[in-house]
Amino acid sequence: MRKTIFIIISALLLLIIPGCGLGRQGIYGGSSKILKSSAEKESSNDIQSSKDDETYITTNVIVEEEIIDIDTSIVNSLVSKGYTLEQAGEIQKILNTVGITSIEIENMTGNAQAGINAIVCFPNGLTDRNRRFYFTTEDGILFYAGFLNEDLYDSVKGGFLKSYNDVHVPETKVNIETYNELQMLASDAVRTYLTVPSTADFDNYSWGIGRSDDRYKIQGMVTAKNMIGIENDIYFGVWFIKNDIGYEIEGIVIDGIRVK
């Protein structure tokens, strides 16, 4: 009897437990699916947040490597004068080769695109007239560049010849002490060639002076009488060279005639 009851209870449990299992699976299965979706969503948010962080870091990273600036002033100057961008770029290459990094164009003798065009300019930020640089193009192509009496670039002679900075630029400045001293020396020298030196009257507004390193030229005008008493205006020039003891006269020209 007890055995029969145990068998019946066992059978009922087998029927109830799977049902309960299905019931639980039905309930918790749905909950499990919901929880899984939340986890997936959270994981997706984490991935997106990570991507956002990567994007933020990438676009805001500080690069220590220096970016070298490229001066485009030569190209801009040439294009403004009628050269094409390509022509201006080729000219800049040549000018950079001879030591010119920037130019301020003073004048042009022709047309940028057709025929011969000589350009005179102030290079590398310099403003002194004795530092002016010049180059020549033909149909927009540079074939010659020079400074003072030096050839820097010549396509016929093979291209690059000399750097702008290697050309000797003579000193041209004269201080007031030197000017006064040369005025006095020139006046004394010119008097010795006048017919009546005692009548000499030097015009204070006609003096001019030039210098090339240790060589000087001073010029002016003097009014003096000749042997018959006629007063004349006489123009003169006196050349000096500076040495260890002072200024030595190299030559004297009076009214276009060299007398020393």
Image: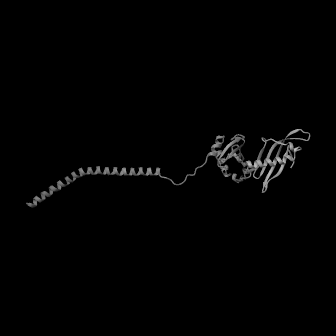
Give the residue drawn at x 21%, y 54%: 21
The residue lying furthest to the left in this view is 1
Q: Nearer the viewer, residue 44 or 124?
A: 124
Give the residue at x 78% y 51%.
Answer: 215
Q: Is residue 14 found left or right of 83 in the rendered image?
A: left
Q: Position of residue 253 (x, y in %)?
A: 84, 46
Coloring scheme used: one colour
Percent across and percent down for residue 148 are 74, 49
Q: In which quarter of the view is residue 200 placed?
A: top right
Residue 7 appears in the picture as rendered: yes
The one of 19 and 166 positioned closer to us in this rendering: 166
**Nearest to the observer: residue 95 or residue 217:** 217
Locate residue 148 relative to residue 47 in the image: left or right. Answer: right
> From this viewpoint, which residue is outermost toward the bottom?
3
Pick out the residue farthest to the top: 230
Locate residue 86: give its quadrant. Answer: top right
Task: Look at the image and tell me in which quarter the N terminus lies.
Answer: bottom left
Q: How many marks?
A: 0
Q: Position of residue 103 (x, y in %)?
A: 66, 46
The residue nearer to you, when weighing 241 against 13, is 241
Q: Position of residue 9 (x, y in %)?
A: 13, 57
From this viewpoint, is residue 148 visible? no
Residue furthest right in the image = 228
Q: Residue at x 29, y 49 (%)?
A: 34
Q: Residue at x 40, y 52 (%)?
A: 50
